[in-house]
Amino acid sequence: MRIPSLKLLLGFEAAARHGNFSRAADELCLSQSAISHQVQQLEQQLGQPLFRRVGRGVELTVAGEVLQQSVRRALDNLEGGLGRIAGYMDPGLVVLVCPAAVAHGWLQPRLDVLRRRLPELSLLLSTDESARFVDEVDVDIVIADRPLQQPGVAEDRWLADEWVVAAAPGLARALEAEPPAGHAGLTGLLCLEDGFTDARAGVLLRGHLAAFRRVGVYDDARLLLDAALRGQGAACLPALLADEALADGRLVRLAGYPPAPGAQYWLARAAGEPRAAIVAAVADWLIEEAGLSRRPAPRPA
């Protein structure tokens, strides 16, 4: 069956919602006769009566009720799609794809600084790492653990991560009162499932941490961080994930556990002139902040 025109469906939907051709006409800025004509055309196309007269108004037939539900769902989907498109029309929009651990631990705490610098910014931050193609899916900037090697894309070596062992302050004090050899008898180990297959994390897990009982193994880095902050065990975790917590003292790096190299991250964006100046401004800020993060922390006085 041929789908009726949107004009006929809109007239029908308004009449069905109001139960009155006159009020439907007022809403759509048409005459009552125009709405009546549209409904007649629709009924002819469908071969079904859609309304029956009731006093000064109309009510739906069974066929009309079925059609109204379908049209309302379609209009809701259309309105939702138009709303999403409107978001992409924002002149301050920048779409950034970033691994969840880096976004949660390193980037999110710094966004207030970025927004103060760029008050017009509307940042769409995605952790969907399958969207790795700059511009192919309206992505402006990608942070990834390997180069994209995509034509027309400029890439910079960005932050290097590392695996560290840390604990909540109370647990850290209890552990540091004992030599590292005795730590496994005092608490369990929290770690990522991916850590077992990561050759670099394996240096810690199969070496210094081999005696620990694994009390929490996570496939989501944010859950690992949450468990560590709750003092549920000593955690082997990426430093960028724990960046804010380590900086503000909610986590403490444990002495006696040397860090192991982690992922090297790259920052990618379109080469040449960006689609908007604000995209370049965000990329420049990310590179600048990464440079600040590389500086060694000041020694305590």
Image (cartoon, grey):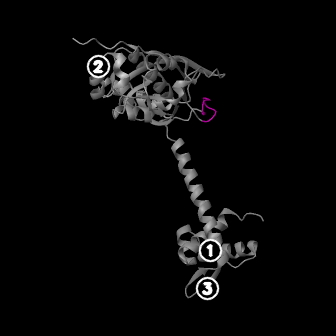
Is disc 3 placed on a helix, strand or loop?
Answer: strand
Compare residues 166 and 60 and report the one nearer the observer: 166
Mark 3 neighbour density, 10 Å: few (under 14) some (14–19) many (20 or more)? few
Give me the C-alpha separation between circle 3 and circle 2. 84 Å
Q: Decide whether the magenta segment is chiefly helix, strand or loop.
A: loop
| Residue indicated by mark 3 | 53
Give me the C-alpha separation between circle 3 and circle 1. 15 Å
| Residue indicated by mark 1 | 65
Tag 3 near tag 1, CB within 8 Å: no
Residue 98 seen: no
Residue 8 in magenta?
Answer: no
Q: Which amino acid type corresponds to the residue marked 1 in the rendered image?
A: Glu
Q: Nearer the viewer, mark 3 or mark 2?
A: 2
212 vs 10, left or right, is left
Mark closest to the chain's N terminus, 3 or 1 = 3
Residue at (47, 32) in percent of width and height: 221
Q: In this view, does 24 lie above or below 299?
A: below
Residue 85: x and y in percent read: 56, 46
Q: Which amino acid type corresponds to the residue marked 2 in the rendered image?
A: Glu
| Residue indicated by mark 2 | 176
Q: Which amino acid type corresponds to the residue marked 3 in the rendered image?
A: Arg
| Quadrant, the C terminus | top left
Residue 45: x and y in percent read: 75, 71
